[in-house]
Amino acid sequence: MAVWRGEPLHTMTVSEIDHAEMEEALREVAFKKFGSNQFWIDKVQHRIPDHLHWHARPNEWKPRLRHRILNRFLRGDSKLYYFMEKIFSFIKK
């Protein structure tokens, strides 16, 4: 996982250069862990909507059903996604 730790600390928007450097750093680690073409970069903000973070996922990884449903209908609206996750968690209890 790569987490934005630059200035400003809590942001979802970074410069193109920072974006490229963050992605390249994550790809380097993922290449060592999973191998060439054995991973993909997940840039969907699932549970933490206030700062940029990405995951390197192995190719066979599939999100839980609720994540697939939320990703399909919310199309990257991370604040609404976070709110709906809270509702899903409350319903499960």
Image (cartoon, rainbow, N blue to C red):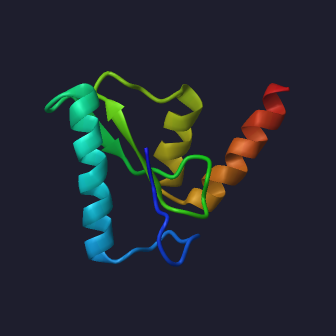
Q: Residue 66: which quarter of the image? A: top right
Give me the residue at 14% from left, 32% from top: 36
As drawn, is 44 to the left or to the right of 93? left
| Direction left: furthest residue | 36
Question: Which residue is pictured at 57% across the width and 58% down the height?
Answer: 78
Left or right: 79, with 12 as reference point = right
Residue 6 x %, y %: 47, 71
Q: Which quadrant of the rendered structure holds the C terminus? A: top right
Residue at left 47%, top 30%? 63
Near-viewer residue (73 or 48): 48
Compared across the picture, whether 32 is left or right of 58 comes to left
Q: Position of residue 42 (x, y in %)?
A: 38, 44
Please state the total of marks drawn on the protein image: 0
| Residue 86 screen position, x and y as percent | 75, 44
Tell me if residue 71 comes above or below residue 12 in the rendering.
Answer: above
Q: Position of residue 23 (x, y in %)?
A: 29, 56
Q: Is residue 73 left or right of residue 23?
A: right
- Indicate whether 77 appears above or below 60: below
Q: Quadrant of the N terminus?
A: top left
The residue positioned farthest toward the top in the image shown: 60
Check the image and report above or below for 9 versus 68: below
> In front: 58, or 70?
58
Establish if 2 lies above or below 22: above
